[in-house]
Amino acid sequence: MRVLVGGVGYRNLRDGSLGPYLADALAKRAADGIEVEDVSYHPVGLHQNLIDRDPYDRVVLVAAVSRPGRAPGTIHSYRWDRQLPSTELIQERVSEAVTGVISLDNLLIVCTALGGLPEDTRVVEVEPADEGWGEGFSPVIEAKLEEIEEAVWTLTRP
């Protein structure tokens, strides 16, 4: 099985840098058909890169994402349902991406709309505690790093 693990986020944005950090850390242990990279560039570019490569059986994305009602450090893993918003909202997401906004939601929506993501796309979202500028994670995220890594590796298995 061929799997791409992609980290999404901003570097030097405390907990918001979780995706790129994990891409760096997990790439050192990738093997057996698993590739790992930081995919924090614009979704149209990722789409183009995906269609230029041999197809992946699965993509696993990991990012710190703030959602209402979740406690900091909450790990939420799911299979992307590929439900897209209206064409107007997709275009808004493309516009945001072109201006440099890095967003897991933008990546999922734009790449799905353009056809770059495989049917089997999985996501690991982690609720951040601190998204301010700076290096290092908040204590709650730091304490969860091993658990987050395991959540990602679990989704790479058949």
Image (cartoon, grey):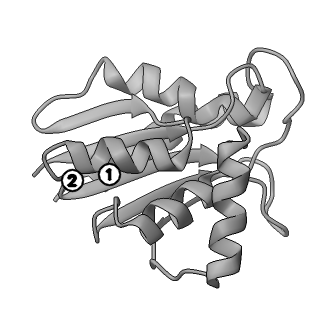
Contact, mark 2 vs mark 1 (Cβ under 8 Å):
yes
Asked if residue 79 can be seen in this view, the reply is: no
Residue 101 on image: x %, y %: 73, 43
**Residue farthest toward the right in the current orientation of the protein:** 132
Q: Is residue 102 above or below residue 123?
A: above
Residue 126 on image: x %, y %: 64, 50
Give the position of the C terminus as an image quadrant.
bottom left
For disc 2, the neighbor class at 10 Å (few under 14, some 14 to 19, many from 20) is few
Residue 124 on image: x %, y %: 51, 54
Picture quadrant where residue 102 is located: top right
For disc 1, the neighbor class at 10 Å (few under 14, some 14 to 19, many from 20) is few
> Which residue appears at 78% of the width and 26% of the height?
14
Q: Is residue 8 above or below residue 108?
A: above
Is 113 placed left or right of 156 in the picture? Answer: right
Asked if residue 11 can be seen in this view, the reply is: yes
Q: Secondary structure at mark 2?
A: loop
> Which residue appears at 84% of the width and 69% of the height?
69
Picture quadrant where residue 27 is located: top left
Question: How many labels sit on residues?
Answer: 2
**What amino acid is at disc 2?**
Arg
Is 119 placed left or right of 102 in the picture? Answer: left
Q: Secondary structure at mark 1?
A: helix
Residue 36 on image: x %, y %: 33, 32
Q: Which residue matches tag 2?
A: 157
Nearest the eye: 72 or 79: 79
> Which residue appears at 71% of the width and 47% of the height?
73
Q: CA distance from mark 2 to mark 1?
A: 6 Å
Q: Which residue matches tag 1?
A: 154
**What amino acid is at disc 1?**
Thr
> Which residue appears at 55% of the width and 35% of the height?
41
Q: Which mark is residue 8?
A: none
